[in-house]
């Protein structure tokens, strides 16, 4: 079997359609299920890692941990198996693009868009933390935004790739060899780089990095050498947005600084708290619920016609009463923008009808 599985090839109970993603340890394919023709994202461990017990354990843990987080913003893992010595995971296929691609195309996001996307990611991370699971690889490439073409609601965001996750209480078997570093340096918390004990606030730090990049158009420490990036996370103060985004309130820099504090004790206690603070700093406030439907007109066509409407939040009430013995047989009513209705006297009764 070649490293890349060609289109049309069968792989276990799946038929490969195309490659949709490639990483350092695995390739992700779009595949059809032979049983029912449904689509799946098939993540297949690369040949070079097939015999590596550390990578095999990560695959099994990704299935176990992702399955443990039942949340609408987490990509569901449906199956794990092995074909010809190669482990695979079958995940829900999300049609759309990831945040990394979006940032590459758009450069940076407007605050409302960034807050909408990362607010959903924050909810997913907090759900994982509630299960005692640390993601440890929060980055734009692991945030999927649905286009609406694959069955998921357009704009819904999904957190994926729990391959580096671990239990905050400590796993019985390590997933890395001594001295081995995991994660993506641009978004890694200082305590992980230094090999110190860590908790869910490593994900708060990473989400702060992603928030900064979403608004600035580049990661917090855009340096060429990995050692320089590591030094930035460990020693340098968090970057500010003032120079790159003068259109944003200065308070946003305070949110980034707290999210990326070197000391975990100084960070936000949850990812949702981070996003809430960012909303406040940018003047967005909490997401506003949809406006309620306007109250219907109440029509009483007894001896007198009473047309009334009220607005509950302000208590405003508008009413019009017409006596049936008026000479008029038709009256037009309008409130704004020429939105008119007709009140017509027919067969001894008043009737409210749409205006022609």
Image: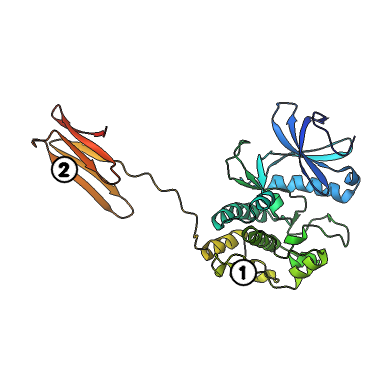
Front-most of 117 and 337?
A: 337
Relative to 75, say whether 108 is above or below. Answer: below
Q: In this rendering, is residue 291 above or below 213? A: above
Label 2 crowd (10 A; few <14 / some 14-19 / many >=20)? few
- Residue at position x 28%, y 48% from top? 310
The disc placed on residue 173 is: none
Q: Callout 2: helix, strand or loop?
A: strand
* Mark 2 or mark 1, whichever is nearer to me: 1
Residue 153: image x %, image y %? 57, 40
Q: Residue at x 66, y 62 (%)?
A: 204
Question: Quarter of the image containing the N terminus?
Answer: top right
User: In the image, residue 188 lies at what x, y percent?
Assistant: 74, 62
Q: Residue at x 82, y 29 (%)?
A: 9
* Left or right: residue 215 compared with residue 19: left
Residue nearer the viewer, 127 or 219? 219
CA–CA distance in space, label 2 to label 1: 62 Å
Spot occupied by residue 277 in the image (x, y as percentages of width and height): 55, 64
**Disc 2 designates what residue?**
321
Image quadrant in which the C terminus is located = top left
Disc 2 or 1, which lies upstream in sequence? Answer: 1
Give the residue at mark 1.
Answer: 243
């Amino acid at each position: 079997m070649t490293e890349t599985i060609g289109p049309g090839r069968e792989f276990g109970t799946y038929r490969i359609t195309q490659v949709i993603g490639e990483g350092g340890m695995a390739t992700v394919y779009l595949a059809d299920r032979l049983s029912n023709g449904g689509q799946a994202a098939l993540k297949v461990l690369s040949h070079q890692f097939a015999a590596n017990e550390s990578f095999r354990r990560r695959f099994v843990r990704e299935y176990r941990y992702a399955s443990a987080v039942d949340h609408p913003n987490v990509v569901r893992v449906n199956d794990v198996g092995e074909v010809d010595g190669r482990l695979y995971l079958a995940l829900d296929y999300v049609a759309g693009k990831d945040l990394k691609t979006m940032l590459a195309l758009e450069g940076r996001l407007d605050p409302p868009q960034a807050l909408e996307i990362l607010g959903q990611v924050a909810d997913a991370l907090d759900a994982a933390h509630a299960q005692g699971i640390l993601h440890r690889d929060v980055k734009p490439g692991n945030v999927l935004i649905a286009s609406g073409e694959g069955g998921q609601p357009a704009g819904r965001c999904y957190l994926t790739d729990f391959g580096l996750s671990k239990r905050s209480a400590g796993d019985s078997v390590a997933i890395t060899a001594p001295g081995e570093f995991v994660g993506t340096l641009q978004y890694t918390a200082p305590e992980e780089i230094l090999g110190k004990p860590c908790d869910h606030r490593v994900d708060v730090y990473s989400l702060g990095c992603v928030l900064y990049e979403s608004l600035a158009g580049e990661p917090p420490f855009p340096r060429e050498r990995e050692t320089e990036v590591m030094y930035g996370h460990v020693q340098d103060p968090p970057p500010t947005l003032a120079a790159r985004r003068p259109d944003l309130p200065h308070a946003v820099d305070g949110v980034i600084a707290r999210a990326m504090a070197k000391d975990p004790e100084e960070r936000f206690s949850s990812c949702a708290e981070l996003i809430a603070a960012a909303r406040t700093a940018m003047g967005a406030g909490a997401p506003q619920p949809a406006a309620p439907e306007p109250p219907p007109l109440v029509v009483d066509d007894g001896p007198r016609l009473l047309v009334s409407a009220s607005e509950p939040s302000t208590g405003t009430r508008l009413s019009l009463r017409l006596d049936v013995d008026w000479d008029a047989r038709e009256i037009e009513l309008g409130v704004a923008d020429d939105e008119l209705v007709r009140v017509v006297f027919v067969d001894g009764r008043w009737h409210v009808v749409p205006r022609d």
